[in-house]
Image (cartoon, grey):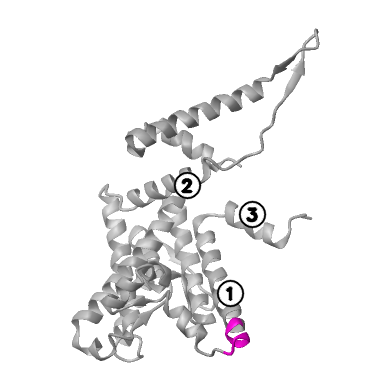
Amino acid sequence: MSDRSFIDEIKYQFSSGNMVTRLIMVNVGIFLLTHLLLPVIAFLFDDKAFFENFIKLFCVPAHLKTLLLQPWSILTYMFLHDGIFHILFNMIFFYVFGGILLDFLGNKKIFPVYLLGGLAGATLYIIAYNIFPVFQKNLIDARMLGASAAVMATVFAAATLRPNYEVKFILLPPIKIKYFAVAYVLIDLAMMPRDGNAGGHIAHLGGAMFGFLFINQLQKGVDWSAWLNNLVDRIAVFFRIRKPRPKKVYKNTDASGSYYQSSASSTSASKQEQIDAILDKIREAGYDSLSKEEKDFLFRVSKEE
């Protein structure tokens, strides 16, 4: 039986899990915080509008002037959900189709597809609300939240990569994912003028287009995720490489009783010298000046506990 606390267990699952697991944990964690903690705060301070006003700060607005005042919302909106079924279905679909991408493309493609697909959905949503007359009366107050566009990008990336791969949902027969993806789009088009969530359906289409184009370009040798993964790797290196670690000093005595440093300590010192030399090179010439071996070395060190 594990001796880890509940918090330690969550940290362990997050650090040891793949990117699909991590993104689901982030979405669920934010959902629990916003839907459990914020209502309590609103109740204690007797402010019924607190929850809605707080969430608005992180929903992406369609109005361009409002967007300029809260630019972070174009990223944060895709980690928010407004109800249990909203997050439940999004995370189920992301788990299934993200898992397919994970199996065939590896861990490094999951976050870029999710994030850039969400950005594509938000972009199409903003454009549509600012150019089509039907949205003008609601433009100033229009806001969007949810991971649906990011999930739609994942669905279409998987369907474009492996169109004949079959998935099975509870109570449904196996279905090829190309048919699932097409049905998803047709439902969005059919519901757009009918259910009062036209902006959300438009964002889904933006995510779908990105997922298709991402795989289409990848199959042609163009990797749209490379710059984002490179950026994430740099951030990981700079935030973790200098993380203080306990220093283990091993000392032995020779026949005369004199102390000398063990090879383990010497190896640690040598590694730190390599790190310092590489970081100096980055400061002088930038990250791109590093060789592949130097980048791999930094990334390995950044992952060490």
Give the numbered dot on residue 32: 1
Q: Estimate how packed mark 2 is, as few (under 14), some (14 to 19) or many (20 or more) residues with alpha carbons within 10 Å.
A: some
Q: Residue at x 41, y 62 (%)?
A: 165
**First of labels 1, 2 by sequence position:** 1
Asked whether the residues under the numbered discs 3 and 1 touch, taking CB atoms below 8 Å apart as contact, a structural biologist would say: no
Which residue is most to the top? 256
Residue 232 magenta-highlighted: no
Helix, strand or loop at mark 3: helix
Helix, strand or loop at mark 1: helix
Which x, y percent locates residue 41?
Answer: 60, 81
Residue 21 relative to residue 133: left or right: right
Amino acid type assigned to the residue bearing label 2 in the image: Ala
Q: Estimate how packed mark 1 is, as few (under 14), some (14 to 19) or many (20 or more) residues with alpha carbons within 10 Å.
A: some
Among the 4 quarters of the image, the one containing residue 295: top left
Which residue is tagged 3?
Answer: 12
Please give the range of residues in magenta: 41-46
Give the numbered dot on residue 224: none
Mark 3 or mark 2: which is in front?
Answer: 2
Which residue is tagged 2?
Answer: 236
Residue 199 relative to residue 243: left or right: left
